[in-house]
Image (spheres, rainbow, N blue to C red):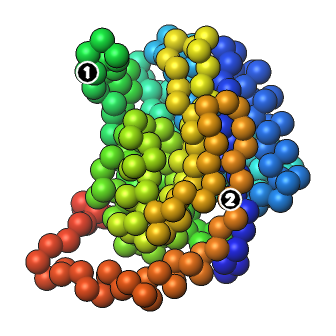
């Protein structure tokens, strides 16, 4: 396993039309690869604006135009591609998944993750969202094993649940990838420190013309909770040099898992227990 690699977070400004977004995403992935990135991540809903009307307009099957672009671009640029998310249609249903697909440098689908927790919140005059009216939550965690170690995935509000990050860490993940929420940096740093892993957050750039204005500020936190790479609100590519040996060193100096009282408490994956 190679312990060091460069990662790129594509904080793209998402436009109204899917075709334009797919062209833009492919161009930015190519730029990131030319600059040495071996692992590239796109943001949540990189294919369309974040709004139910656009989710319905641009819903697609798992092998639709977004998947085709991701597979082709991963292969052309010889990168691991963590493909943001797109609205995935569910056969026989009027509801959707919020789906992330992961491709290897041969353009092969390694895994897909469907956002688990649905964003049903009422923030008063600022915002009210009932994601469960249109979406269905995924029912499993997703890990991919690459030459650069293991990566676990979450989307938006999934980051707010420490149990998810803990379950990924128990699988010896060195990396956790998230897209999107409020309290963005606080949650990112806490998840990194609690589990002694790198945590990357990538979101769409701020676009005031969109019906839902996203935050931007994509970043990478190291296992000490330090932000080692970040950007602001505008379209950008965030590059981070990742050294997974830092995880081993931090866990050696502070062996939390050796001290942990598993005789008193534990976090378990109920879906794995059922199987």
* Relative to 137, 147 lies left or right: right
Mark 1: secondary structure: strand
The reply, left or right, for residue 256 in relation to residue 53 is left
The residue lying at 46 percent from left, 15 percent from top is 52
- Residue at image position (61%, 11%) is 209
Observer-nearest residue: 253 or 109? 253
Residue 245: percent from left, percent from top: 59, 81
Q: Which residue corresponds to mark 1?
A: 122
Report the residue at 50% width, 17% height from top: 212
Compared with residue 1, is residue 154 higher up or lower down, i.e. above or below? above
State the separation of the CA atoms marked 2 and 1: 35 Å
> What is the quadrant of residue 136 in the picture?
top left
* Residue denoted by label 2: 240
Residue 217 visible at all: yes
- In the shown orientation, is residue 136 left or right of residue 76? left
Observer-nearest of 94 and 223: 223
């Amino acid at each position: 396993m190679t312990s060091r690699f460069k990662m790129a977070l594509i904080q793209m400004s998402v436009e109204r039309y899917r075709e334009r977004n797919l062209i833009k995403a492919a161009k930015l992935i190519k730029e990131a690869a030319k600059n040495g990135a071996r692992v590239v991540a796109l943001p949540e809903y990189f294919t369309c604006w974040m709004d139910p009307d656009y989710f319905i307009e641009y819903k697609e099957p798992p092998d639709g135009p977004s998947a085709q672009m991701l597979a082709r671009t991963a292969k052309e640029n010889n990168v691991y591609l963590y493909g943001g998310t797109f609205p995935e249609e569910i056969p026989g249903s009027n509801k959707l998944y919020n789906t992330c697909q992961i491709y290897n440098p041969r353009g092969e689908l390694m895994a897909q993750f469907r956002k688990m927790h649905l964003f049903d919140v009422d923030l008063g005059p600022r915002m009210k969202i009932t994601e469960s009216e249109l979406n269905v939550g995924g029912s499993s965690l997703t890990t991919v094993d690459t030459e650069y170690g293991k990566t676990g995935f979450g989307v938006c509000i999934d980051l707010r649940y420490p149990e998810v990050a803990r379950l990924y860490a128990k699988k010896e993940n060195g990396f956790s990838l998230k897209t999107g929420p409020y309290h963005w940096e606080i949650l990112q740093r806490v998840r990194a420190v609690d589990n002694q892993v790198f945590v990357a957050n990538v979101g769409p750039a701020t676009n005031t013309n969109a019906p839902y204005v996203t935050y931007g500020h994509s970043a990478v936190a190291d296992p000490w909770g330090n932000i080692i790479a970040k950007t602001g609100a505008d379209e950008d590519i965030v590059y981070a040099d990742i050294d997974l040996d830092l995880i081993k060193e931090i866990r050696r100096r502070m062996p939390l898992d050796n001290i942990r009282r598993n005789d008193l408490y534990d976090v378990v994956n109920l879906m794995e227990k059922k199987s």
